[in-house]
Structures are given as structure tokens and as C-alpha cells.
Image (spheres, grey):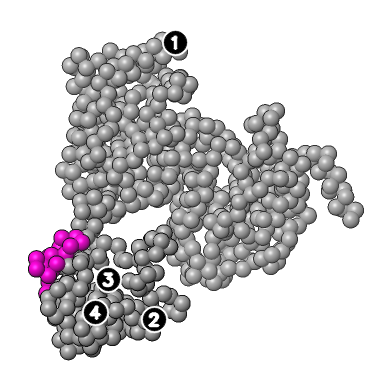
Amino acid sequence: ALSATATLDGHACSRACAGGARWPVQEGGTPAKVGMTAESATCGCCGGLAALWRDRGAAAAKARGCGQSRSPNGTPKWPTAGAWQDSSPNVGGDTTPAGGGNNVGFFRAPEKKGLMAPRSEGKSGNSSEAYYRGASDAACAGALSCQGFVTRNELTEASRGMVIVLVGLPGRGKSFISRKLDGFLRWQCKRTETFNAGKYRREANSADQSGRADFFDNTNPEALAIRRQAAMDCLRDLLDFLDNGGDVGIFDATNSTAERRQAIVEEARRRQHKYHVIFVEIICDDPEVLMTNFKNKVRYSPDFKGLTMDEALRDLQARVKQYEDRYETVDDDTQSYIKLYNMSSKVMVNRIYGSVAKSLMPYLMGVHIGTRPIWLVRTAQVQANASADAGLTDEGLLFAERLSAFVTRRMHEFHGATMPDKPVKVLSSTVTSCKQTVEAFFQSSDELTTQSFKQTSALGPLDRGRLSGAWWVDQCTDKPAFDSLRKRDPKWLEQWKANKLTCRFPGGESYKDVMARVEPVLLEMEMTTRPVLCVSHITVIQVLLCYFLGCPLGDAWDISVPEHHLFEITPTLGGSYRVETINIDDEPLGPNQLLRRRSRRLS
């Protein structure tokens, strides 16, 4: 509240516009600020209607967005820092503040020392330094009424269900992207299902007939009717899945014309929940990538069964030509879409906000078809019943050395004769034992001594709240020590057994909480093109393995993560992963590693 003795009349913007709202006017009716036009009673900032307010005999004139005190003659004057007062908890609201009067809203003063009062209108406010710092006025609330902001607000809110529609010519990688999205969304605990129009087409007409190029000729009316009906049946089953409680439906089809795509949007809007539709167009013109995709498609697709590789490729290329003649790219800006060029080397988005922009979009940008090994490994062994900063045991150090020998050998197999400066990406939790494991790993290899690594708390172990302690680490075998909780907190253990996914430790985390914080690390692994080594803890590795194995996150607690083993994960052409558990106790040490161990033992 600002001290003032004048009796003031004023106009207030009905939209609470920060740029022109609540500007007091002088007693003669002249606006004290250009933002409010007294004659027309409209806001000059946003065009909103103005409501007249009066404050007679009050000890304070409150003006949200303005904050100017006024002398008895109506001259605006900035208060000193000591003149700011906080007279009501109603910040920016439109109810009457404490202290009486008919004031409409007010500007809350800074409470903490060191915060600056508004700059004066004098010399310093107009200086070039102030320009480069940026305007200190509140943002214009009138922008909230523009159509673009209204659309953004609607799309930012989470919808009841979402339809992801793939778009693209045959052999562009639509099914690959569908499978990747399906696995990622399921890992996020979203009820997700993929609906492939080609499968419906083969069920309506056998693959040896419906899979040939002439079946995709639009001058063939019978075949055209079968394809359209199959696509519509597929879409309706997808929408039925959402109606029955599904979260995301993925429509895997060419969807190559604007007419077809508009029909999809209209069909989704006919349903009760008016599902949000997002188009994901896959565009690829790289000849090498296309040929790889074509060969992979004809090798596994039922459409080409019984044909030689050359015959199948010719038939597929003829089918592609049928689609190219009528293909229409996604360019309707009233629709939400993501366009991926040559496997995310270029990305274009429209009307993408909220969780899609925060999670799905970065995931799609990180996905690629390159191969590389990903290694997940538990931290090396530490002393029993030790403090949080305890060192590794001799067995732990030996494990780190064997891990270094294994990774070095595999890096040579991956990179060949020429080793890059940073041959492997190393990620680690911030826990001391993880850091020591990685440091021993680097020191054991002559080729990794200059390699850096990234530590992140996102890879830290499950927070067990009041049930934390060294006992948990000591009693873990290849799985977390949940059975030990029978004596420590049997009541909570029963709650956890009823809901292993979302039940939190008292004052700690659940498995679903771990998944949420590990997601950025997973995205980093996906987008990396070189080998990745991740050193973490049992619960985190269990959560990551759920993604790579494609199993429900609710089953994470039961995945075996044995000590002194590593998981080697390799991407497949189809979009899934091959996961192999490797015991590296038998990995031979190199000559220099043996010398270092002998020297350390002698010292």
C-alpha cells in the first residue's frame, strides 16, 4: 500500500491488464497514465472495458501495475523503499483489500531486504542500461485474450486421451517410430496401444494379394474400398481403446492425404472426450537410409513372403511410386504436428505444448537408427556397515579394473583402429561409491585417463526416507532388500505390496518417482551415438531396464541386478533392444593393469 492523502477517482481495466490497469486519474478527470482513456472507458493497452472505481477518504491509493503514490495535487511520485507496505495477503486479486475502501486489486510490495523498489521515471529509468536490462513493467495481460494465447492455453492442458497419427510414404520408418513411442509411453506408465492399418488390411484381404503394388493403385476401386475400410476400422478400434480408459493410441499408417488426415481429426472430435490429435510426419530422402529401410521392410513384412530380395524391392518401389503421385505433406497449421526430416536431422513443430513439448518432443528428437552399446552396471562393492563416503573394497577395485578392461576391448571393436578423443560417454550418480568406481575405471586404462564423466543426482538410489541406512546396501543381493522390512516396518511393507509402483517409502520415493527423475538420463542415452557406460544403483538400473526390456514399470522391483555383472544393451533395426547380462569376473586384465595392481599391493 502506498501512502497518499489525495481523494482520487479512477478507471480499472476489466481484464486486469497489467499495462493499463488501475491507473488513477486526477480529480479533473485527466488520466494520470496514457494506458487508460477516461473518455471512452477502455484500456489503451488491451482494449478491455473499464470499470469506474472510487476511493474517498481512504488512507491509501492502491494501483496494481502502477504502484505510484500521489501528492495532494495529483502529481505522480515514486515512493521510497521504506514506503512500501504489505497490507493484505490478496496479491493481484480483485477483492477488497484489508483496510477498507472500494479499491480493486493492488501491487504487493517486496518483503525481503535488498529487493529494489521500482525505478523512478527520471534519468536512470530512461538510460541505455535500463533498456538492455529489459522493461521492468509487468507483462501485458491483454495478450491473454489473443487467439494464439487461447490456443496455447488449451493445448498446454493435459487432454483425456491423445491420438498420435503417423504420416509418411512407405519405407520411411513409421513403424520404427511407432514402436519406439509405444515403448517410451508405456515406460512412463501411460496405457498405450499401437494400431497398424496394414494389419487390418491383411486381415481383410490376404497378404499375397493385398501386399502387391497394384493393390495400391487408386484406379483399382475394389482395392481402394478395402484399404479405406481397413484404415477406418483401425482408427475406430483405436478410439474405442481410448474410450475404455486408454491414454495414448498410435495410428500407424501412411495417412498420405490432407483429406484423410482431416477425417481422422473429425472422427476423434465426435467422441465424448474430443481427443487431441498429433500428426508425426516422417520425411526421408537419404538414399542410404532409404535402402536400409527398404531391405529391412521386405525382409520381415508378410507382404513380400515368397519373393526374392530383388523382386520384393522392385514391388515395394512400385508401391512407393503409387503413393508419391498423390502424397500431400502436412501443412495445415490449424492442426498439431511434428515433422521429422531424415531421422531428426531437422525438426518442425506446430501447436505443440505441454507434456508433448516437455517429454515426447525431446524423445523424438533423440531417436536415431545408429547402433552402439549401452552398458548399465552397479556401483562396485563397498565395506559392510560403512558410512556414505566409505571406500571400495579390494573386490570392488578389482571389479572396476575388469570393467575397464572389458569396456576398452569393446570400444576397440566398435570404433575400429582409430579411437576418438572421447570414445565413450560415462554417466554416474553423485554417490561416493559410484564416483570411486568410475575413477578406478579410468585409472585402470591408459586410453581413458583423459576421459571426463558426468555426475547427476538423477541416477542416485531410491530415496528410502526414514528407512534409509547402510543396512539396506549390506542386505541387497541381486534385488533390493524389501524382505528386511518385515521387521523394520511391516505395516508399510503391506502397503507397498498392494501398490509396488506408486507407494512411496515414508518420507522418500516410489519407483514411479525414480522413473520421472531418470527420464532426462534416458533421453541422453537415446540421443548419444557413441557407446554409453552408466554406473548407478540397483533400483535405478531396474527402472532403466524396464524401458530396454519393454516390461511394465510395476515389475521393476523383481528384476535381478547381480553384483559384478553388467548389462550390455544393443538397439535393433525394429526399434527394440537386445539385452545381455555379462559376468566380467573372468575378464582378463591387461599387462599394465596387472603391473599397477602388483605395485599397489607392494605399497
Span colored in magenta? 37-52
Disc 3 target residue: 65
Seen from the viewer's position, the closer of residues 420 and 474 is 420
State the SS at label 3: loop
Disc 4 target residue: 75
Question: CA separation, marks 1 and 3?
Answer: 72 Å
Is residue 392 shown in magenta? no
Amino acid, disc 2: Ala
Question: CA separation, marks 2 and 3?
Answer: 17 Å
Left or right of 449 on screen, residue 2: left
Instruction: Look at discs 1 and 3 and give the one toward the viewer.
Output: 3
The answer to whether marks 1 and 3 mark residues whose Cβ atoms lie closer than 8 Å is no
Is residue 40 shown in magenta? yes
State the SS at label 2: helix
State which tag comes first along the sequence, 2 or 3.
3
Q: Looking at the image, can residue 300 be seen?
A: no
Disc 1 target residue: 310
Which residue: 55% across, 32% down?
371
State the SS at label 1: helix
State which tag comes first along the sequence, 4 or 3.
3
Query: Residue 32 at x, y = what percent?
Result: 20, 73
Q: Residues within 10 Å of mark 2 (few under 14, many from 20)?
A: some
